[in-house]
Image (spheres, helix red, strand yellow):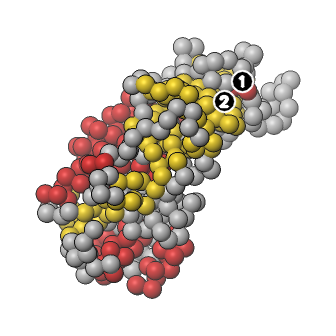
Amino acid sequence: MSRGERVIVGLSGGVDSAVAASRLLEAGYRVEGLFMKNWEDDDDAEYCAAEADYAMAREVADCLEIPLHKANFAEDYRQRVFAQFLHEYEAGRTPNPDILCNREIKFRSFLDHARDLGARWIATGHYARVRHHADYSELCTAADTNKDQTYFLHTLTQEQLRPALFPLGDIPKEQVRERARELGLPNHARKDSTGICFIGERRFRDFLAQYLKAPEGEMRTPDGRVVGRHQGLMFYTLGQRQGLGIGGIDGFAEAPWYVVDKDLPGNALVVAQDPQHPLLMSPSLTTEPVHWIHGAPGLDEPLQARLRHRQPLQDCRIQALDAAGATVVFDIQQRAATPGQSIAFYRGDVCLGGAVIATRTTGQSSPHP
């Protein structure tokens, strides 16, 4: 890749994207920033952070002496990300909107806009690396394994990955903060953003209830004993311990309760006091159609996978693979393999791709939707 070429950096107002831009400047690129607004209709001032984020991005751009563009992708976000997010919850599954957001907004709408601005490259503050070969590109894990974000990027295509740069892929988060302080960036101590991609931190149950009806129902043990009421199956996920409100039940110990299953037809939440209950443990799972970034691995090839961000990589093999999806078998049973969430596959430090989890087998019955 040629230095001196134009690159558009997604400036969010956070420290990661700011330092990403500074590193590209140091490498000799012609850097410009782009602030993306992707959520509107915020009447609650408590959550209306977009203007504050833009003001901070503006300060960062001024500090780095780079131009800052602004684009509104709110309609794209609603149609391509949020609608699917609601559909999955309505079906009783637990989606990961960050994965879809990267594919549809940060590396599609943003990429298209950057090209319209005449840029060859785009860059973000993701903790990941990319290896650009002559005829293909590889998505690789970050040097900071605790911050690695390839799980959220595993649906990227070659078209999306080829013009991408990840300037933070080779440094730890601590060094990013330190560099921001050295540069005098105004956001060097700013808290990292959390919550739903582009929507932010919210009282999730209240937010979701604005869009979907959530009928209450029974909380039952695996043998059918009623121990409480749930507020709507969509508000709970496998393995969840907090927020169940169960206590003081005759015949049960004063021990934590965990969500171990969902009975969708019966609108019942299945709970137990064993954090390793057989209903939570899966030796295998099936997926929806798999996306491969650059070619599929061989059947029964030793691979690794993760079922959630920051999970240590788990040894596995793909036992069956066709256009409908894959059957994945693990060396060690996986806790809380959740339909609607995603699995990402790895060979060494290369992220090969991934898929949405469709069903899981368990130690008690198989399969579970």
Query: Residues at badges 1 and 2 in contact (C-beta under 8 Å)?
Result: yes
Question: In the image, which is nearer the foreground, mark 1 or mark 2?
Answer: 2
Camera sees residue 36: no
Residue type, mark 1 in image: Gly
Residue 270, image x, y percentages:
66, 23
Residue 95, image x, y percentages:
46, 36
The residue lying at 43 percent from left, 25 percent from top is 322
Mark 2 crowd level (few <14, some 14–19, many ≥20, 10 Å Cα): some
Give the SS element for disc 1. Answer: loop
Residues 138 and 134: in front is 134
Q: Is the residue 62 above or below the residue 342 in the image?
A: below
Q: Residue 60, labelled with which disc?
A: none
Residue type, mark 2 in image: Pro
Q: Is the residue 233 above or below the residue 131 in the image?
A: above
Q: Residue 363, labelled with which disc?
A: 1
Q: Which residue is mark 2?
A: 283
Q: Of callouts 1 and 2, which one flags the residue occurring earlier in the amino acid sequence?
A: 2
The residue lying at 23 percent from left, 43 percent from top is 75
Q: Quadrant of residue 51?
A: bottom left
Q: Would residue 283 be found to the left or right of residue 173 on screen?
A: right
The residue lying at 67 percent from left, 17 percent from top is 365
Q: Would residue 151 be found to the left or right of residue 50 on screen?
A: right
Give the SS element for disc 2. Answer: strand
Residue 146, image x, y percentages:
58, 60
> Mark 1 and mark 2: span between their CA atoms?
8 Å
Mark 1 crowd level (few <14, some 14–19, many ≥20, 10 Å Cα): some
Residues 234 and 31: in front is 31
Camera sees residue 265: yes
Residues 264 and 219: in front is 264
Q: Would residue 197 be found to the left or right of residue 264 on screen?
A: left
Residue 261, image x, y percentages:
63, 25
